Image: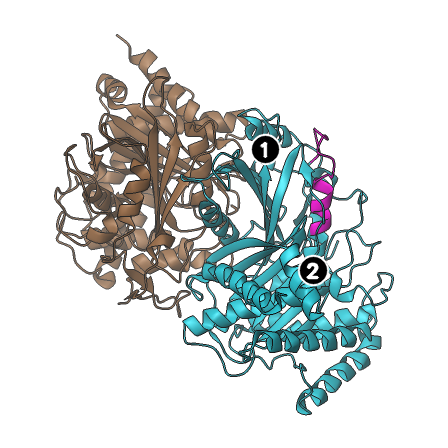
Chain colours: A brown, B cyan
């Protein structure tokens, strides 16, 4: 089964410096009735699985491809002990130690001789506040050629239940291909635009529209239209050095209550507030390093074109490029620039058909595929300074075998020349930020978590009644 | 500082399937006076180091080389938090969980953008017997281009002291380049042969001798001289499939008392007994898989040509190829074949000069260098079926800051087409075996630990008074 180019590209461009897997860190409370060996027992139960569902049962037939072509075949000999790992945190077992372990696990390449996923159960996480019960974590990792973010979220939704009393639940590798119990929402940026039925990309029919869109974008940019930004017009910055293979993962959640207070007061979306927080965090980090570019940083925003009827597998993505207004000192003006720029991008994507959107994405991201093949990745001007992705998740609590999911934080991937990725997931009452960075290119990146918070506080102060 | 070919080759032939680092697993008792946070406190103390000694302070100037040339440069910006990690075992914290974690850590490539080493402190190891105090472990990993086994052992000897009362000891990355406090013994296979002063390899002067040696070896093999074996005459076997990047590490120690009892009774060396145990383990494993070749398996035995005056850095190695007698059913006859074959190899190496020994090693291992470059590694006949290496260590207890070193188990590397490596270290009262294997090519390799023991038991029974 040959992978479509949109899936295979993630394998083609992968290197030790730029692994192309995504991951998720999930933090859980133990079930109220849990024994001290509950997690160990659960691990023992899950590792008895002998039936594996696609794509968890697939391996690459030629691990390194042939002329850029890859194909899946069923793996007759899956070693589940390899894929499902049991780990522990060293003392004192804070979130800090958890993020160190996940950073490490997220830095290593998946083994291409096996199905491209790993799941780690992690014990020893202390409670957030003294007196509360201890917690545990799960870190899941799979290659982007298997799923995109929205597809992965659909799998996660199948793994977890809204029912706190359900027990003996199956693992995703046993059930991935069965139908979704609850469809995942359509990602927010496209919620208002009509979606087509899934279909194959028709490049010839679409090329005219894509070229027209890029021409239109270039004209608007030349005319200085507010918030208008071209792909590959990003300024040079610290965020865009050549990356190495070591990752730092940092994560935190912010309540929707706080974020929607600001959004309502200013007439913007919660997604706009999240972008403004990200913009503030990068601006502050770069100011601290005396490296803020005069021109505004730009963000590439992946947009799902997956429909309700699609399975979770593979990639169905397009992209917006937005002006992040990092050159603007005033927080309200900065947010307004971001809102305007997002709106222009959304309008432009909405004017295209589904296949044109995918074609547009292929057209603007093709340098990422061609660059590594020619060995020139990360040397030209980047498509955008940073990728900021928002994958909607469930807005009410989820459980695994009675263990309440406290939070799910997305860990994403980097391309050569893009040292930071910000991915958001909505879950329960919070917007959860996962920051994935090259540890060497962006030292002390974890400080951006504080800057996200101060960005939100600043907007809260300005909008307080 | 350009790396000599003998060091650079380890970088040249490295791939995701065949990482070229070596490691060591060390198990310690806590010091008698240790507080519950002793290991965490020690980690905190060690990570305050700001001075780094070569080669721990070196990084590669061109991580992927240029025309096969690599050079070291001092790294001005060492992130010690990256190199020195604090980890923990999940419950129940047995040696089994420790070996799973070390297998995992040993499977990942070192980051070539940084100095090529990692040290992991690991807490949560339960005592061997109930009622005894808990233990901790250290796993150290460095690239073979930095050190060979004997060089690494010299560094270890500097890290640990014979004095149980010494405190505030320095880490090897702070002291590697200072003079050895106690010289390490010359490896046993060469103890009786004269050693030259270190010098540069003179290939032209040596070529005649090397060619003569190989001709002599070929003639003796044709004439059917007992124990005589040519490089690249190894039979095809399960041990010589194409490998993947996932490793299984298994380790155990056997008392010298037991091994020397057998050695004395049969008039062989302890090293011969260790080879016979290894031979029995592989023979039994292959019989279990109905895959024992008719022809005897052959072993490649690295031999150090390092002198007392050499520093620990770099590689100074030659090789013997021995007949492991796996075709022989009778354990005593099998041991006799091994002894004869080892003796012939030792005599041959002893007849060469130091530089000729290195040249001989380069000549017979060159297919390992050329193979990966041409993409044909592991497709031809292997040099030998398995590498068996013996790195002598201290024969009395060692301590780190009062923590008694219980055992040190070597984790080694694999080449494409060689799925198993057996490395031995002598320490205190034990010979300690570290088995490193491709997890996918050799399923359930850890069973060989039992087979090592039954091999020794068999010889014990036959030599019992």
Q: Residue A147, how many percent across, how many down?
A: 28, 51
Q: Which residue range is magenta in the image?
A: B153-170
> Mark 1 = which residue?
B30
The residue shown at (72%, 56%) is B314
Q: Is residue A363 above or below residue B82?
A: below
Q: What chain is tagged by disc 2?
A: B
Q: Residue A182, how many percent across, how many down?
A: 12, 41
Q: Is residue A217 above or below residue B320?
A: above
The disc, 2 or 1, on the residue closer to the chain's N-terminal end is 2
Q: Is residue A91 above or below residue A44?
A: above
> Do badges 2 and 1 share one subunit?
yes
Q: Nearer the viewer, residue A75 or B185?
A: B185
Tag nearer the camera, 2 or 1: 1
In the drawing, what numbered circle is on residue B7?
A: 2
Indicate the quadrant where residue B54 lies: top right
Q: Is residue B228 magenta?
A: no
Q: Secondary structure at mark 1?
A: loop
Q: Nearer the viewer, residue B165 or A83?
A: B165
Majority secondary structure of magenta residues: loop
Q: Is residue A326 visible?
A: no
| Residue most extreme to the front | B465
Q: Secondary structure at mark 2?
A: helix
Q: What chain is tagged by disc 1?
A: B
Q: Residues within 10 Å of mark 2 (few under 14, many from 20)?
A: many
Q: Nearer the viewer, residue B429 or B57?
A: B429
The residue shown at (68%, 48%) is B428
Q: Disc 2 versus disc 1: distance between alpha carbons?
A: 36 Å
Indicate the quadrant where residue A349 lies: top left
Q: Is residue B84 above or below residue B332?
A: above
């Amino acid at each position: 089964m040959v992978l479509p180019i949109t899936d295979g590209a993630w394998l083609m461009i992968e290197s030790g410096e730029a692994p192309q897997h995504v991951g998720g860190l999930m933090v859980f409370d133990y079930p109220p009735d849990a024994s001290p060996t509950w997690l160990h027992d659960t691990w023992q139960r899950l590792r008895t699985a002998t039936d594996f569902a696609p794509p968890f049962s697939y391996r690459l037939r030629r691990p390194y491809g042939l002329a850029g072509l890859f194909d899946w075949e069923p793996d007759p000999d899956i070693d589940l002990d390899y894929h499902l790992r049991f780990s522990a945190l060293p003392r004192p077992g804070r979130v800090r130690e958890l993020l160190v372990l996940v950073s490490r696990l997220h830095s290593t390449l998946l083994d291409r001789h096996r199905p491209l996923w790993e799941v780690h159960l992690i014990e020893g996480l202390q409670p957030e506040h003294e007196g509360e019960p201890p917690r545990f974590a799960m870190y899941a990792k799979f290659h982007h050629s298997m799923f995109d973010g929205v597809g992965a979220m659909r799998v996660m939704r199948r793994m977890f239940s809204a029912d706190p009393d359900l027990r003996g639940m199956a693992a995703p590798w046993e059930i991935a291909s069965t139908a979704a119990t609850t469809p995942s929402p359509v990602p927010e940026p496209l919620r208002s635009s009509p979606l087509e039925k899934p279909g194959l990309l028709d490049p010839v029919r679409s090329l005219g529209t894509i070229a027209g869109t890029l021409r239109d974008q270039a004209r608007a940019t030349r005319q200085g239209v507010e918030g208008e930004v071209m792909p590959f017009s990003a300024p040079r910055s610290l965020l865009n050095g050549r990356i190495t293979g070591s990752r730092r993962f940092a994560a935190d959640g912010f309540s929707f209550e706080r974020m929607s207070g600001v959004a309502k007061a200013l007439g913007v979306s919660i997604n706009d507030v999240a972008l403004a927080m990200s913009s503030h965090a990068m601006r502050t980090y770069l100011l601290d390093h005396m490296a803020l570019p005069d021109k505004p940083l730009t963000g590439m925003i992946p947009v799902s074109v997956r429909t309700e009827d699609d399975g979770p597998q593979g990639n169905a993505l397009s992209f917006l490029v937005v002006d992040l207004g990092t050159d603007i000192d005033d927080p309200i003006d900065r947010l307004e620039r971001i809102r305007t720029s997002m709106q222009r991008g959304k309008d432009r994507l909405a004017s295209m058909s589904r296949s044109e959107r995918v074609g547009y994405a292929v057209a603007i991201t093709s340098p990422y595929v061609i660059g590594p093949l020619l060995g020139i990745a990360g040397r030209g001007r980047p498509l955008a300074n940073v990728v900021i992705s928002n994958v909607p998740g469930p807005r009410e609590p989820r459980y695994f075998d009675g263990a309440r999911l406290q939070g799910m934080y997305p860990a994403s991937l980097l391309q050569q020349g893009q040292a930071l990725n910000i991915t958001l997931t909505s879950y329960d009452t919070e917007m959860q930020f996962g920051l994935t960075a090259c540890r060497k290119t962006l030292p002390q990146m974890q400080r951006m978590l504080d800057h996200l918070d101060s960005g939100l506080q600043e907007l809260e102060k300005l909008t307080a009644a």
